[in-house]
Image: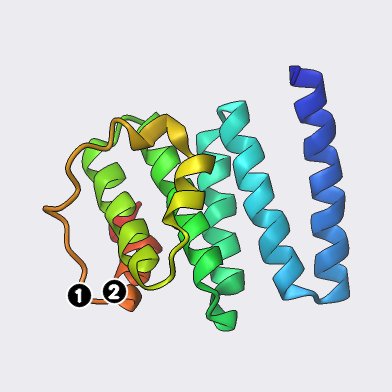
Amino acid sequence: MSAGDLEAAADLFMRALASSRLAGDARQTAKVLHSVGDLRLRQGKLDDAEAAYRESATTARPFHDPKSAVYCLAGLAAVAARKHQNTRTKKLWRAVETVSAEHPLEVQARAFYPEFVAGAGDVGEFGFSSVESAIEYGFSTDAA
């Protein structure tokens, strides 16, 4: 995809985001925000990608949807990897694995974020006592 194609996609996503917000459709808003995060990640706009993933997670949180959590955590891990924040990448990926242990979505997340998985290394040193604690860490300011 060319830079022009990515900008055209960004424009369409911003329109979809405005429409879903206007309609009060929080689920759709969360999905569009996640797509915006993926697009910004692809464009190399890491701060924008991180903000979109975080807003997506916050918007989706009331629905208790583990799939949304896994993908937002994986997106945040991809941003951290691209910023060369190795410890943060490992912790976020461990959070993905923790949520995935109960909700088997990790394989899908690995397929969407391959750029950092191979370099994540051993994440076993970072343990979470529950899915909730993994999600809390992923979206906390400590992970920022």
- Assess whether mark 1 and mark 2 are in contact (beta carbons under 8 angstroms): yes
Q: Which label was assigned to residue 13?
A: none
Up the image or down, 38 lies above or below 131; here it is above
Q: Residue at x 53, y 66 (%)?
A: 67
Amino acid type shown at disc 1:
Ser
Front position in the image: 134 or 11: 134
Q: Residue at x 27, y 37 (%)?
A: 120
| Residue that badge 1 annotates | 129
- Nearer the camera: disc 2 or disc 1: 1
Near mark 1 (Cα within 10 A), the count class, few <14, some 14-19 or many ≥20, is few
In percent of width and height, residue 34 lies at: 63, 53
In percent of width and height, residue 65 lies at: 55, 75
Q: Residue 40's quadrant in the figure?
A: top right
In percent of width and height, residue 101 lies at: 33, 67
Left or right: 131, with 18 as reference point = left
- For the view shown, which residue lies furthest in the top direction? 2
- Classify mark 1: helix, strand or loop: loop
Distance, label 2 to label 1, CA atoms, is: 6 Å
| Residue that badge 2 annotates | 133
Up the image or down, 89 lies above or below 21; here it is above
Left or right: 55, with 122 as reference point = right
Q: Residue at x 15, y 53 (%)?
A: 124
Near mark 2 (Cα within 10 A), the count class, few <14, some 14-19 or many ≥20, is some
Front position in the image: 107 or 37: 107
- Classify mark 2: helix, strand or loop: helix
Q: Residue at x 69, y 60 (%)?
A: 31
Q: Residue 80's quadrant in the figure?
A: top left
In percent of width and height, residue 13 lies at: 80, 47
Left or right: 113, with 7 as reference point = left
Give the number of callouts: 2
Amino acid type shown at disc 2:
Ser
